[in-house]
Structure formats: C-alpha cells, structure tokens
C-alpha cells in the first residue's frame, strides 16, 4: 500500500478512536485492536503529528502516581474525519471501476 495513503488512513483511524471522548494511548490501542494492530511507537508518532496539525489537544493528569497524557479531538480533527468519508466514497467508486469484471463495450 502507498505509504502516504496508509499514513492518512492511520491518522483518521486514531481520530475516530477519540472522537467520542478524551482518551489515552493504551486505551486508543485497545479500542482499535478489533479492527487493526498498531504498535505504541506508531501510535505516538501519529499522535504527535495530529497534535502538530491541531487536530487534537493534549493534557497531562496524574493517574496511579504517574502522569498520563489525554488526547481530545478538535474541530479540525472532526472535519478531517468528515473529509475522509467524502474521499472514501470517491475511492470506492474508483475501486468498483478497477475491479469490474465481465463487462465489455462491444
């Protein structure tokens, strides 16, 4: 798979994992697990990129004697999810064109 396409898909998946409420790294990975495997290093790289793009905000809070980072989606992150949905419809149309079988133009 094209690396840029995969990066975009993973970014949107992480945004989707936090769109319903604040979350933290381990929970994000756990919530995504039924759909895809993601390493912690990959997740934290994505979270930094999304924070830099202002698609999420980060706050630190103590939990169990340690600081935990909590991530919350921003309006820009929600817009990215909506843009993805539109883009995906276009991708599916292209996919259906590429995979059509048995249709001939005689």
Image: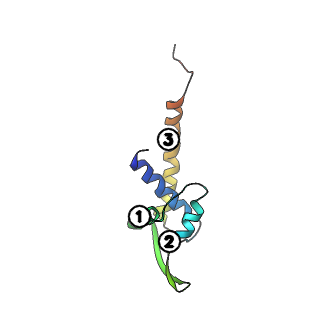
Q: Is residue 80 visible?
A: no
Report the coloring of the rendering: rainbow
Which residue is drawn at the image coordinates 51% and 47% (left, top)?
Answer: 86
Dot 2 falls on a residue whose secondary structure is strand
Kindly report the distance in space between the C-alpha atoms of the residues bearing marks 3 and 2.
Answer: 30 Å
Question: In the image shown, does 68 or 37 lie closer to the viewer?
Answer: 37
In the image, residue 28 above or below residue 83: below
Residue 31: which quarter of the image?
bottom right
Which residue is drawn at the image coordinates 49% and 41% (left, top)?
Answer: 91
Q: Which mark is residue 45?
A: 1
Q: Earlier in the sequence, mark 1 or mark 3?
A: 1
Residue designated by label 2: 71
In the image, residue 64 above or below residue 105: below
Kindly report the distance in space between the C-alpha atoms of the residues bearing marks 1 and 2.
Answer: 13 Å
Q: Is residue 82 visible?
A: yes
Query: What x and y, as percent, mark residue 28?
Result: 55, 66
Question: In the image shown, does 83 or 22 lie closer to the viewer?
Answer: 22
Q: What residue occupies the far top of the structure in this picture?
A: 106
Residue designated by label 3: 90
Kindly report the distance in space between the C-alpha atoms of the residues bearing marks 1 and 3.
Answer: 28 Å
């Amino acid at each position: 798979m094209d690396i840029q396409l995969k990066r975009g898909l993973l970014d949107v998946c992480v945004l989707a994992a936090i769109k319903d409420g604040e979350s933290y790294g381990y929970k994000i990975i756990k919530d995504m697990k039924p759909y895809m495997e993601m390493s912690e290093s990959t997740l934290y790289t994505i979270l930094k990129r999304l924070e830099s793009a202002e698609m999420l905000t980060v706050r630190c809070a103590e939990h169990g004697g340690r600081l935990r980072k909590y991530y919350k989606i921003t309006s820009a992150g929600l817009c990215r999810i909506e843009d993805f949905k539109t883009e995906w419809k276009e991708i599916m149309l292209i996919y259906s064109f590429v995979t059509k079988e048995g249709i001939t133009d005689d």
